[in-house]
Structures are given as C-alpha cells and as structure tokens.
Image (cartoon, rainbow, N blue to C red):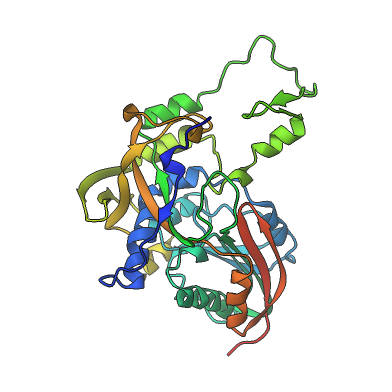
Amino acid sequence: MTTKNPLHIPSAFQADQPDMTPEEKEQQYVHSVYQAIAPHFSATRYKPWPVVEEFLMTMPLGYVGADVGCGNGKYIGVNDKLFMVGSDRSSNLISICGERGHEAMVCDGLALPYRSQFFDFAISIAVIHHFISPERRVAAIEEILRIVRVGGRVLIFVWALEQTGKRDFDKETQDVFVPWALAKKPTELRKSSEPKKPKANSRPQGVKKKDRKNNNGDNVSAGQATMEQDEAKGNEENADAGSVVTDALNKLTVQEDHTDSQGISNIKENSLQDQGSTAADSLSSSSAHTSTATTTAATSTTTSNRPNPEDTPPTPEAAAPVYNRYYHLFHKGELEDLVLQTNKASIVQQGYDRDNWWCILEKTRHE
C-alpha cells in the first residue's frame, strides 16, 4: 500500500476571513503565489491540451484572439495563422512570454485593456476557478465577452470537483488550497533530468512494446500504459524539467518570514526582473495589486524527484518551500450556469477533459 505524499493533498480554504477583501485574498492566495513559482510552473506547462488545440486550429485564417490568463503563453503560438495577444496578472510569467517572442501584457482579468468587441475569439484556460466569489467569476466571464464581437466564440476551462486524478478532493468542499512544491535545489533537478543511458537489451526503434505491468501489478498493453502516463492524470503536467527548470530556479530565491495563526508561512520572494514586452511594462503600474510582495506557503514539507512522488513518503532531507493556491472546484453544470447569468452568450458545446469542465460559448449580444 502506497503512502500519499502530503504535497498532493489539498486542504479546505477558510473563506470566512472578514479582515480581508476578495481582492486581498486573491492577491495573497493566487497572484503572489504564481509570481513566486513562475519559472518552475512554466517548466511544467508545455503541451497544449487537445480540446484547446482543436479550438484554435479551427479558427479561420487571420482571426484575432485573446488568451486571458495566458501564463507562459503556451497556447499563443499553437496556430501561426492567427494573431493572438496574451494577458496575465503575473509579470514573471509575462516576462517568459516575452522571451518566447509572444505579444503579452500584465493586466487584471476583471479590467482587460482592450476595446469592446475587438477580438474574433478568446480563450481562458484554468483561470476563472481562481476568483474567490461567484460574483467575481461571473464578472470575469462578462469581461471576456465584452472584448469579443457578437458571434465570436470563447473557450473556458475550469477545474472540476468530480476529477479523479492524483488529487484527493472532498466532494463536499468546493473551495480549497492546492499545494505547489518547489524543488529543493536546482542541482537535484539537473541530476533528475540527465538523459539515461540505454540498457543493453533496449528495444530497437520500430519494435512494438510488449505488455507490461502498471503500478498496481496488473498487466496492461503498451497503448494503455501510454494513456496512464498522460497529463490527464493531473493538471500539473509531469514535465521533464531539465535545464529549463534549473536555469529558472537559479533566478528564484525565497526567504521564510513568520507563521501566522492559521499555520501558514509568509514567504518573501525576490521577484524576477521583468523582461517582457513594452506593453507589459506600461500596463504593470495600472494593474491592481501586481504580485511583487509576500506570498503564502504552507509550512515547509518535502518533495521527491521520483516520477510518482505521491508513492513515496517524504523525508526531512527533501524539504522544500510549498505554496498554497486557492481554487474553486466547479461541479457539473456550474460553469454553464455562470455563462447563462451573463445573458450575453449561448452554450455551443461543453464537456470534461483533463480533470476540467469546459465549454465553448458564442456571444449573442452586447450592451
């Protein structure tokens, strides 16, 4: 029987904090966290999800689109026949977009700096679940619809309460903290990412794999084994971090400060120097509460460089800073209900993929 790694176990979010506004909660439990983990987070975000890729590839030649909450910009260049602009609250993630040659800027998802009805389409992938209240989630959807022309389409992904991946969610709790553990040392990542020497009996290229056993000892086919390794098993894609993470983490330093009454450590992080686009620089000052101050982390626990860290109990030697991110887990049909509350769009298609609920909506009216 395997022991669940605490780093993969979410905890309930204490929503009743009268001394904090919704904006302050999002700043502390979302924006500051992503600002601190940006390089490590970016290294795990490299493979487009099939539904998103298909949506982008079906857009007509020359369409102009917005990626709201673009992160490291992995979707901006999926279809080079389109022109896409990204936006995100994290200046460190926007800097990564700039280094990759993408057009992206720092801004607030509730106050996008675009003209109304300017874009032909928009996407917002795994973003809206970070807004604290139902009202702010509706407002985020309305803001995306504002910038899209009537008849334009929007694709939205949000985490599902019903997901059955590596996380152990209480189906009665929709508002949770989900931990993100940084690697202990860049050198550890370097060692884990070094290419392995082929075994003497390595299978020649083109020869079909034989059936093998999975982690439970059951025989599975090669095709099924591949499916088991797919990133759908968790939203944190199991990246071969390699030198990308090593270089990124060399730029990132954190310092523990003190622990509050809830057992959450305040982490002071030295922000990466912004190297993004001119647009990112000009808009960062107008972005409310841009994440450059303190971030929130659970008490330092542990991590492992093994492929399946949840299978191995952590050890003191593997101690690493852990950051808690706020998520609202959507139950089936909840996203569609929020879209219909805007009274500005219809649902074209919806589904479940990669432990997310998603829907494509079409803007029907503009006020």
- Screen quadrant of the C terminus: bottom right
Residue 302 relative to residue 46: left or right: left
Asked where in the image residue 181 lies, by quadrant, the reply is top left
* Residue at the bottom extreme, as displayed: 367
Can I make out residue 276 in this image? no
Residue 12 relative to residue 59: left or right: left
Going 69% across and 11% down the picture, which residue do you hit?
Answer: 201
Residue 256 relative to residue 100: left or right: left
Going 53% across and 33% down the picture, which residue do you hit?
Answer: 308
Question: Residue 131 in the image: x percent, y percent?
Answer: 45, 68
Going 52% across and 77% down the picture, which residue do you hit?
Answer: 138
Q: Is residue 366 above or below residue 89?
A: below
Residue 241 relative to residue 186: left or right: right
Comparing 337 with 339, the one in front is 337
Asked where in the image residue 331 lies, by quadrant, the reply is bottom right
Question: Residue 235 in the image: x percent, y percent?
Answer: 55, 49
Can I make out residue 53 in this image? yes
Comparing 36 with 61, the one in front is 36
Question: Residue 350 in the image: x percent, y percent?
Answer: 70, 66
Query: What is the number of callouts on the image?
Result: 0
Q: Is residue 229 above or below residue 234?
A: above
* Residue at the top extreme, as displayed: 200
Question: Residue 317 in the image: x percent, y percent?
Answer: 32, 27
Comparing 321 with 87, the one in front is 321
Q: Is residue 208 above or below residue 254?
A: above
Going 79% across and 23% down the picture, which residue do you hit?
Answer: 206
Asked where in the image residue 61 lies, by quadrant, the reply is bottom right
